[in-house]
Structures are given as C-alpha cells and as structure tokens.
Image (cartoon, helix red, strand yellow):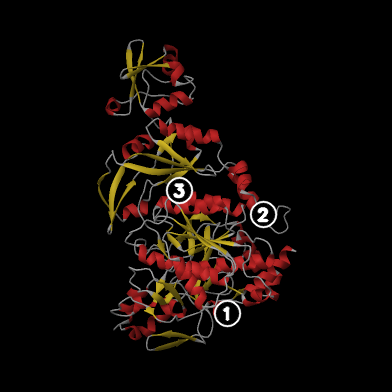
Amino acid sequence: MSKIYSSPIKDFLRPSAKFYRVRRRIFLVTPTEQYLILSAGLINNWEDDIVSKPRMLVLSSAAMASVLFFGSQTLAASTPATLSVLHDNVAHNLLRQSTMTGSASSSTPTTFEVTLNWRHQNQLQSEIRQMYTPTSPQYHHFLTVSQFIAQFSPTLSEVQSVSHYFSQFGITLKKTSTNRNTLEFTGTYGQIEQALHIQMMRYQHHNQSFTANNQDPSVPANIAGLISGFIGLTNYHAFHSSLANTRSLSHNHSGRSSTSQPQGYSPQQIAQAYQISPLYKSGALGQNQTIAIATLATFKPSDAQYFWKYYHINRGSASLNIVPVDGGYPTGDSGAGSGRVETSLDVERSGSLAPRANILVYEAPNTSQGFYDLFSAVVSQDRAQTMSCSWGEDELLATPAYDMAINNIFMEGAAQGQSLFCASGDSGAYDGYPEIAAPSVDFPASSPYITAAGGTTLPINGQVPIPGGSIPMRTEHGWGWSYLLPYYKNFGYSTEAQFYSVIFPVGSGGGTSAIFRRPFYQLGADFPQTAGRNVPDVALNADPFTGYAIYDTSPGTSYGEGWLNGFGGTSFASPQWAGITATMDSALRAQIGFANPLFYTVFQSPQNTLFPAFHTITKGNNWFYYDHAGYNRVTGLGSPDVYNLTRDILSLTH
C-alpha cells in the first residue's frame, strides 16, 4: 500500500480541497487524496463512510485510524511515493523554439483527451506480425472491430478507474471512443493543473499563440499504467500538407498558377508509367473497395467530379462522401485555402487510379485533438480498406507520447487489415527545418504501421522542364531540388548561394526516426543498420517540375482558381499509392492490408528478380541521403511496377 504523507500548509489554499473531521480534529483532503483513500480500500464509498456537513465532511474514526497507521498524522498531498510521472508528454523541441508569455488562466475551460494503452500489447504486436507472414496459419486472418475491442481494448472497469480519478477534480468525462482507448474530458486549466500536478503556460511561436504544459504529468500509480498519454494539453497547430509548387522558386513570383488548361502528368500517363494499365485491362478498377482521405481541410466535391470528367475517368456508380470528425473543418479559417487544394488533389488523384472505388473524405479541425481523432475515426469505423493522409509535422515537434498514441491507432488498423499511407514530407532529410536544424523525419509517416510514400523526379521524355529551358534526365531520380542549383540564373537569381537559400531542403522526406524502433520488416542486411525506423517505404513521382495539375475553384487561395499547375510533393505520392493499392485489392480479390510486410517480403524474394516489383532508383538525393541500388532513405524500395508487384504478391500468397 502506498504511504500517505502530510500535506504542506499551502494545500489549505487549494479551492478543490475538502475538510474532514475526525475526533474533533480537522483534516484537509485534496481530490487526489480522496482518490487515494478510495483506491486503497480504506473506505467503501463516500456515501457509506462519510456524512456530509456544511463546508466539511466527516470521515469515520476507523477509516482515519487506518490512514494514520499507514502514513502519518494527517491526510496528505501527492508525493513521489504515491504518484507516477508519465514521461514524454512535454513538447520540448517546440517549447525551446517558443517564448513563454505567462500562465494560462486557471478558469479557462478546455477539452483534452486521455489515451489508454492496449491490453496485451506485446501479444497484439506478435499477432500482427503473424497476420502478415505468408507462411503463418494466421496469415491475413484480420480482426473485426468488435473482435479487436474484445481482445485488446481497455476494459470498462479500467475506463471507469481513470474517469473516476479525474471526476474528483470536477473534470467531466464527455465521451469515450468506440474502442475505449480514448477518453475526452472537459474542465478548466486550474482543474487540469491539480489533477496532473503540472502548470499550464502561454507561449508564442512565430505568429501563433498557444497553451502547453512544461512538465510531465503525474497521476496515482494504480492508473498510471493504463495511460499512454494526453492530447490537447499542447494546443499548437503544427500540421501542414506536403504540397509543393514551382512558382515559389521564381524570383519575385506572384504565386498564382491557374490556367485555362491542365499541364503535367495526367492520370492515364501515371497509370502507364507505373504499369497500372494492365490491371485495368484485366477488369480490376478498384471496385468493392473504399478509400479514406484523412484531411484537415474541406473541398468542393464538384471540383473532383469536373477533374474526372475532363480526364475521362469513368467512376461508374462509385460514391464520394464527406465524414465530419469533431464537427469537420471550421468555416472561415484563415488557412482554409491551401488546405482545400490539398484535399482536392487527394480525392482527384486517388479516385483516378482506382476509378470504381468509393471515397470517404474524413475532415477534422487542424488541432492536435482533431488530427488524432481523424485517424481514430478512420480506423475504429473500419469503413475503408485503404487510407491516405498528406498532412503531418516533424515527429520531434509533438510530444513523443502523442506520436505513440496515434501509432497505437495505426496498430489497430493493421490488425483489421487496413492499408494506411502517409506522405513522407517535402523537406528532404530535414523535416523540422528551420526549427530543427538536424536531420529528422515527418510524422505520421515515421510510424512503423504506416506505409510512408516518398517522392521521385519522373522525367518527361528525358527532360525536366524549367523556366527558359530544360534539364536532361534520362531515368527516374530520387526527388531533391539540389539538381536545380546550376540553373539558378533560369530562376532569376544572381548567385547559386542565393538560390540555395530558397530551395533547401525541398525534396523527398526520408531518414531515421528518433522515436520509433526499426520494425521487423526492415531487419536484415539489405537495410540500414539503424536503431530507428527508416523512412520512406515506397515512392512515386512528386517533383513539381515533372508534376501535376489540380482542379480547384475554392476562393481565397494564392494559387488562383480553376486549373492549378506546377504542383507536386509527396502529397501526390500518398493518395496515388492508396488508389494503386485499392486497384491491386480488386485484382487480388483480397485485402493487402498493412502493406509494408508484404512489400518488403516481395522486395527480397526471388520473384522480384524475375518480375521486378520496384524500379531501381540509383540517382538523386534529399540533401543528406543518396539514392542507390536497394533500399535507401530517399525513395525507400523504389517506385512501383504495379503489374509485377501484383503478380509477385499473388505468387507469394498462393
């Protein structure tokens, strides 16, 4: 049993503390102590053992005697002996780059989430591995949502234990997620400070003001093991889309890229370049599949319909629907313009490569809670076999516990047989630049349960068009704009150094995670011998100079309206990979599910020698890592030969 120590006299100033009278003596008991008394079994419940009095409660002498025997002469405040610190819940890198402006008002109401660990987490990891090992009897025996909840979700009693603790401070449970691993609470900053033994502070980062805790929370030890982290204590909005545009490079550019006609690769040209067309000819068009687009902005469905009509994409009876999460994307948000362009391209390009697949567009607010709830909705609803997300942030700017909480959601997706793709980022090996100068990677692409989609430069007829000319390039390269440096004059710059400051570090996001360990599918001599998970896994054309058009008529963007040209970024790689996977699922008449184990197995198999599933990319860099034969941290396994990849998967699994 935990010891209970004396409360310091300052505890008498706590507004949420209550007085208890035992044998004519008055004791102060805070909400934490109330919870400790209950959980220690010193009283059965407040109704049986405590009699309410005005401004005080009377505790039975027998119960208080037990407390005195095991602890001290008064009921006590929380101490290291009774509390456990929940580490990795402070965004240290973000706070180092920010200016503290004062304390948060204790009376300010807020909403936050407590995320819980899966039960039997080691067993879950083992079962996922067996599900994706072709020789295992459990291969592709995916779980339903109800089966997952029964085997791995926190129990109702565990949820009640956590909820009861917070209720002692006046914090109210608002809702519990379907899979019971997320509890949403409402309370004031003052109540949160008391419950978690932290201080909530105000900060300024560039033009954004936000609130955050600057120390790790502490809770009673008997519930600490249930909790994986907290979401919403830090309300900084850091998420951005992985979208790049050529116009930003021209000296004194206007930023507008709209024209009356589209330019760049059409869906049909991409299908031909990556050998998707043979699947279409066999009748595999993504039918009986659903793609989820996870996004932090809304869009106009009519824009996607116009895009498909222009390119003669026959969508048949495939549906397109919006699924709001946490109320959906807020109207009137100043950042809505560029975000809408992102959502438009995600829908247009994924639906083009899987023309008969249904599409669900999950839209959430651009907040830490919104981003988490976005993935929770996609996975716990399990309405889509494939997901794409082109939003993210440097994995080191959030709290490690936040990244781990979302990773837990992706684990459920893997167990349910969902294929989850995310863009690897457009800042090369320096995802956090300029806030973080060292190499780092993007999250959620760095999650080991995500297929991270990197970028390439796919030359057009052996050339890369640039202002005033073109650059010869015979083969597909890893995407990184360092190849543009000798052509600085074409972009209106007087020196190469001046141009360098503009284009660094744009390129395919890649590197090694500082948070997640190297997963089982990246073990072996063929892969970098690192402690962390390596990014990306696969790649696709993403260079804006060999890029794409987007059709978007949303007002308020700097790009203009209508056909927007000169776009690229790994934002295009992820949704197109989602579309490709939906089409492969149709061809295989089965779900690939979590794609990485199968893709890496194919890559190392004899079938890959006979029918290469990935294009070998040996040139290019992302400003730190270089492309070479085999796996590399610019383009991963490479860009796909979809027909061969499908044949190799079929050969391995039959």
Of circles 3 and 1, the one toward us is 1
- Residue type highlighted by circle 2: Met
Disc 2 packing (10 Å; few <14; some 14–19; many ≥20): many
Of residues 180 and 612, the one nearer the viewer is 180
The numbered mark at residue 313 is none
Q: Nearer the viewer, mark 2 or mark 3?
A: 2
| Alpha carbons under labels 2 and 3: distance apart | 26 Å
- Foreground residue, 109 or 302? 302
For the point 45% across and 81% down, which residue is it? 263
Q: Position of residue 256 (x, y in %)?
A: 34, 76
Query: Looking at the image, which residue is at 35% across and 53% down?
Result: 236
Type of the residue with mark 1: Ala
Could you say whether the residue bearing mark 2 is in a helix, strand or loop? Answer: helix
Q: On the rendered image, what quadrant is the C terminus found in?
A: bottom right
> From where the camera sits, is residue 459 visible?
yes
- Among the two numbered marks 2 and 3 on one chain, the one whose residue lies closer to the N terminus: 2
Asked if disc 2 and disc 1 are in contact, CB closer than 8 Å, the reply is no
Query: Mark 2 — residue?
Result: 131
Question: Would you place residue 458 above or below residue 180 in this image?
Answer: below
Residue placed under numbered mark 1 in the picture: 273
Image quadrant where residue 195 sits: top left
Residue 573 screen position, x and y as percent: 51, 70
Q: How many other residues sit within 10 Å of disc 1, few (<14), some (14-19) or many (≥20)?
A: some
Q: CA distance from mark 2 to mark 1?
A: 32 Å
**What residue would you read off at disc 3?**
401
Image side of residue 109 versus residue 653, left or right: left
Label 3 crowd bin: few (<14), some (14–19), many (20+), radius 10 Å: many
The quadrant in which residue 335 appears is bottom left
Task: Using the image, determine if residue 548 lies above or below residue 239.
Answer: below
Which amino acid lies under the numbered mark 3 shown in the image of this protein?
Ala
Looking at marks 3 and 1 on the same chain, the residue that comes earlier in the sequence is marked by 1
